[in-house]
Amino acid sequence: PKLGSLGSNSTGSDPSVFFLTGIPGLESLHLWISIPFCSVFTLILLGNCTLLYVIKTEPSLHKPMFYFLTMLAVIDLVLSTTTVPKILSIFWFNSREISFNGCLAQMFFFHSLSILESAVLLAMAFDRYVAICNPLRYATILTNSVIAKIGLMALARAVLFMVPLPFLVRRLPFCQSHIISHCSCDHMAVAKLACASTTINNIYGIIVAIFIVGLDLMFISLSYVKILRTVLSLASKEEQLKAFGTCVAHLWAILVVYTPVVLSSIIHRFGHQVPPHIRDRVLLLFRGKSF
């Protein structure tokens, strides 16, 4: 069904079904837009699977930094399969329906994995800090046991912070529109459809953003301040470039992950003056990664 025909089924007190719009205003171009989406999704699957295979089969890569890369690759695979197949089904088959429970599950996994991704990036910053600032103790500090504990703690933190999220959304009454102006079930995009106050949801989202994104970015920044001081103290320019070159990939990953999170959160909460069709397209570009 076309979006316009959903009106009779998209309102009411029973929130058992929601409808995702895709990209508002560009419905006629969904088929063409699906081409880059599908291409990027395929590259993500192939690239990460190849990376995992190479790291597993090459003994020389069995090192802390590559273990963290393995975690990041697995997170990226699961994170992509949480949302992209549904987005493609909207673009290809106009399959906009999603059950309320399915929406909550997608929301939980997407945001949990985003928090987990942030923790792994912080762990990678710590890895670079030890490798450059304290190289003689690198092997004794980052043992396999320590890396496993870091991974488990990161997972526990992600789950602990996101368990309340589905319950906070489930308690809300949805007596008006059930049309989500998005390609996926983002927390604030769904909460805004409720016909009751969403203050608690908003406050919780801000708290999570501050304690997760804020603290992680702060510790990553502190790590790189110390790394930069150590690199600049090296005798030759060649040594400086070689040391800092080991951090380039990590810095790029930080920009790719955190830029959408920060900008998406700001737009969701303070972008009321931005025209809806522009706001929704920007949020789609940023993959809706807000809390």
Image: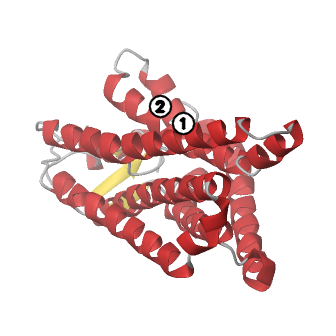
Q: Are marks 1 and 2 in contact (CB under 8 Å)?
A: yes
User: Looking at this view, is 38 or 209 the one in front?
Assistant: 209
Judging by the rendered image, the residue that carries numbered circle 2 is 263
Dot 2: few (<14), some (14–19), or many (≥20) neighbours within 10 Å?
some
Residue 182 seen from this side: no
Quarter where residue 3 is shown: top left
In percent of width and height, residue 23 lies at 53, 38
The amino acid marked with disc number 2 is Leu
User: Looking at this view, is 200 or 230 the one in front?
Assistant: 230
- Looking at the image, which residue is at 41% across and 38% down? 181
In percent of width and height, residue 112 lies at 39, 60
Judging by the rendered image, the residue that carries numbered circle 1 is 259
Quarter where residue 201 is shown: top left
239 vs 167, left or right, is right
Residue 97 seen from this side: yes
In percent of width and height, residue 110 lies at 43, 58
Q: Image quadrant for the C terminus? A: top left
- Looking at the image, which residue is at 36% across and 48% down? 212
Q: Secondary structure at mark 2?
A: helix
User: Looking at this view, is 33 or 129 the one in front?
Assistant: 129
- Looking at the image, which residue is at 77% across and 72% down? 50
Dot 1: few (<14), some (14–19), or many (≥20) neighbours within 10 Å?
few
- Looking at the image, which residue is at 49% across and 40% down? 222
Q: Secondary structure at mark 1?
A: helix
Residue 25 sits above or below residue 204 on the image: above
The amino acid marked with disc number 1 is Thr
